[in-house]
Image (spheres, rainbow, N blue to C red):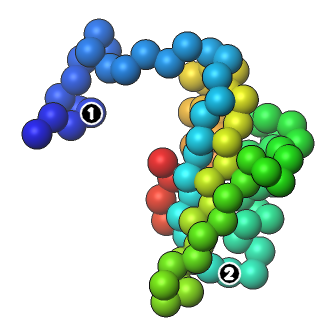
């Protein structure tokens, strides 16, 4: 099995910017979770329309998954979004 840590920069998949890029954020299903993560992403992208946001609740309703598709402009933008999202206590995973 190959992991990302096994790949050199040369072997890593290349992303051509600008592109549509889905970001999946998983965290505790708190009442303001969706609004919080959307607000953080919008700081880096501008307003995101509702059709670009998909929300799923876990079967036991303990977790919420929010997938936001953005128009990614570069690696720095994505790194900043991921960094800001990971600072939120209720966020458990960002993909």
Question: Is the C-beta separation of discs 1 and 2 under 8 Å?
Answer: no
Task: Say left or right for 39 vs 10.
Answer: right
Q: How many marks?
A: 2
- The answer to whether residue 42 shows anywhere in this view is yes
| Secondary structure under the numbered disc 2 in the rendered image | loop
Residue 7, percent across and down? 22, 23
Residue underneath mark 2? 30
Left or right relative to 72: residue 91: left
**Outermost right residue:** 47
Extreme left residue here? 1
- Residue 56 vertical placement versus 67 (above, below): below
**Spot occupied by residue 8 in the image (x, y as percentages of width and height):** 24, 17
In percent of width and height, residue 24 lies at 55, 52
Q: Quadrant of residue 34?
A: bottom right
- Earlier residue among tags 1 and 2: 1
Which residue occupies the foreground of this view, 58 or 11?
58
Residue drawn at x 15%, y 34% is: 2
- State left or right for residue 27 relative to residue 70: left
Relative horizontal placement of residue 42, taking residue 14 as reference (left or right): right
Quarter of the image that includes the N terminus: top left
The secondary structure type at the circle numbered 1 is helix
Q: Is residue 63 above or below residue 80?
A: below
Res 4 label: 1
Measured as percent of width and height from the top left, residue 17 is found at: 62, 15
Taking the view exactly as shown, the residue that stands out farthest to the top is: 10
In this rendering, does residue 87 appear at all? Answer: no
Q: Residues within 10 Å of mark 2 (few under 14, many from 20)?
A: few
Q: Residue at x 27, y 33 (%)?
A: 4
Gap in angstroms between the C-alphas marked 1 and 2 = 31 Å
Residue shown at 70% from the left, 37% from the top: 70
Residue drawn 77% across the image and 74% down it: 32
The quadrant where residue 16 appears: top right
């Amino acid at each position: 099995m190959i992991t990302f840590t096994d790949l050199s920069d040369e072997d890593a998949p290349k992303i051509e910017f600008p592109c549509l890029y889905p970001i999946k954020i998983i965290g505790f299903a708190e009442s303001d979770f969706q609004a919080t993560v959307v607000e953080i992403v919008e700081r880096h992208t501008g307003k995101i329309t509702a059709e670009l946001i998909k929300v799923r609740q876990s079967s036991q309703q303990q977790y919420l998954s929010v997938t936001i598709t953005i128009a990614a402009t570069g690696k720095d933008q994505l790194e900043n979004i991921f960094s800001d999202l990971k600072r939120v206590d209720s966020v458990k995973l960002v993909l």
